């Protein structure tokens, strides 16, 4: 008999009833150190007081009105996001994949309005992940995500990640945009080197192509900058955001320049819930904490500490771990043992990590993780690695 929850996930047996910062607690009091943060969603950990206050204050005042009316919290969040980024304008969504949908529509509409309606193709890369909507799976293009769901949305050109020659060769008069994650998340924490992001920007400028960055996982302070592309000193034309921006409340956004967004006039797009007062109240509180020099400096300091300890961990378990990669507090350990075995052993040691492609375990802790918690995390990972070695 089919479970009453559609069985699209194979779930671990833990069941949490409470969260406190970097900790998740089961009903019997068992405490897990959370290095997954709900897959980079709980950027400020669990039950951050500023987020709890923002949500409960808004919940007592007004939940929802629709986008038929002015939404002051939405305006406030749009103003914060544009003040801190390349963007001139923001559309709010409820998830990453909805941000992908709009990014694709926006790029196509841009060229349609420029009297180049044939420019519909979007170049994407192997190992990418852009969500599970029809555009999201077609954009990523992997068999794992698309098999059985055809016919797929046309208009995506899939290239090997890191193949520069293939990229230059793939650009035609039909190319509308290039879509890329500055740091691949699901693909195994694979950063695009700064030089390559710069090269992509130049290539786009040369051919008048739009650059769309998917910062759903790597954005909002995760890499130690507010958005990951800042490390390369470039800016996109369109950027997809979600996950961390809501700190656990379902919230996403598409940020764009005035030029890239020029086709999106009244009636061309919409969302019932997107930018609703509850989500935007939380988003404002998240931005107030994270878009702060001192906060981001701390993220970078702690990232250095964690990375250094992970190098030691890997050296101590060469049969289990191979190397660490990533940026800021978005780290991946490439494993020699099966990544899923290590994640499972972590459960026994009460530390939560997230598997990714390329036999990687992802560490995406709350950006607020403390030095002591970093030390504790590495000691629990050490216990998990010892258990995997012995098995
Ligand atoms: C998670 C993710 C998405 C999809 O976000 P949802 O909120 O699950 O729809 C898209 N892009 C990237 C890079 C992601 O990590």
Image (cartoon, rainbow, N blue to C red):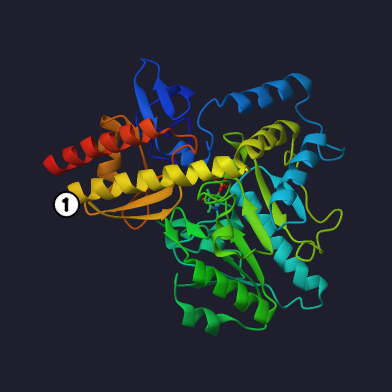
Q: Which residue is mark 1?
A: 319
Res 235 → quadrant: bottom right
Q: Quadrant of the image for the C terminus?
A: top left
What residue is drawn where x is 47% and y is 42%? 39
Q: Is residue 118 above or below residue 21?
A: below
Q: Nearer the viewer, residue 173 or 207?
A: 207
Residue 319: % across, % down? 16, 51
Say what secondary structure mark 1 lies in: loop
Residue 145: % across, % down? 47, 56
Would residue 69 be found to the left or right of residue 354 on screen? right
Is residue 378 in view from this perspective?
yes
Circle 1 Cα neighbour tier, 10 Å, few/some/many (<14 / 14–19 / ≥20): some
Q: Quadrant of the image for the N terminus?
A: top left
Q: Is residue 216 above or below residue 143?
A: above
Given the current orientation, which residue lies at the most extreme left position?
A: 390
Q: Is mark 1 within 8 Å of ligand 1?
A: no
Residue 51: % across, % down? 62, 28
What residue is drawn where x is 62% and y is 24%? 52
Q: Nearer the viewer, residue 342 or 308?
A: 308
Q: Is residue 271 above or below residue 136?
A: above
What residue is drawn where x is 75% and y is 65%? 260
Q: Is residue 281 above or below residue 108?
A: above
What residue is drawn where x is 42% and y is 27%? 23
Would residue 348 be found to the left or right of residue 178 on screen? left
């Amino acid at each position: 008999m089919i479970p009453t929850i559609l069985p699209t996930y194979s779930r671990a047996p833990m069941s949490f009833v409470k969260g406190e910062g970097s900790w998740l607690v089961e009903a019997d009091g068992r405490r897990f150190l959370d290095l997954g943060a709900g897959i980079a969603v709980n950027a400020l950990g669990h039950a951050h007081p500023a987020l709890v206050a923002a949500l409960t204050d808004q919940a007592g005042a007004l939940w929802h009105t629709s986008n038929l009316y002015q939404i002051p919290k939405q305006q406030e969040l749009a103003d914060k996001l544009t003040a801190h980024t390349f963007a001139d304008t923001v559309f709010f969504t409820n998830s990453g994949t909805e941000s992908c949908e709009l990014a694709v529509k926006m790029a196509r509409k841009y060229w349609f309005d420029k009297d180049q309606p044939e420019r519909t193709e979007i170049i994407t890369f192997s190992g990418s992940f852009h969500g599970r909507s029809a555009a999201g799976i077609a954009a990523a293009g992997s068999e794992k995500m698309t098999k059985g769901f055809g016919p797929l949305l046309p208009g995506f050109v899939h290239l090997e990640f890191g193949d520069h020659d293939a990229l230059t060769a793939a650009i035609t008069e039909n190319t509308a945009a290039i879509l890329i994650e500055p740091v691949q998340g699901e693909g195994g924490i694979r950063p695009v080197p700064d030089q390559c992001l710069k090269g992509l920007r130049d290539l786009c400028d040369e051919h008048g192509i739009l650059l769309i960055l998917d910062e759903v996982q790597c954005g909002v302070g995760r890499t130690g900058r507010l958005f990951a592309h800042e490390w390369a000193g470039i800016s996109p034309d369109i950027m997809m955001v979600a996950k961390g921006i809501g700190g656990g409340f379902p919230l996403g956004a598409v940020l764009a320049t005035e030029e890239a967004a020029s086709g999106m006039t009244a009636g061309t797009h919409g969302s019932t819930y997107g930018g609703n007062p509850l989500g935007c109240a939380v988003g404002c509180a998240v931005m107030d904490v994270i878009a702060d020099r001192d906060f981001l400096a701390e993220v970078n300091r702690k990232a250095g500490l964690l990375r250094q300890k992970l190098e030691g961990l890997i050296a101590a378990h060469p049969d289990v771990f191979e190397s660490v990669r990533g940026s800021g507090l978005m780290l991946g350990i490439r494993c020699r043992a099966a990544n899923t075995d290590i994640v499972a052993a972590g459960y026994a040691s009460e530390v939560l990590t997230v598997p990714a492609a390329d036999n990687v375990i992802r560490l995406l802790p709350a950006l607020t993780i403390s030095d002591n918690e970093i030390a504790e995390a590495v000691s629990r990972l050490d216990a998990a690695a010892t258990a995997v070695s012995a098995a």
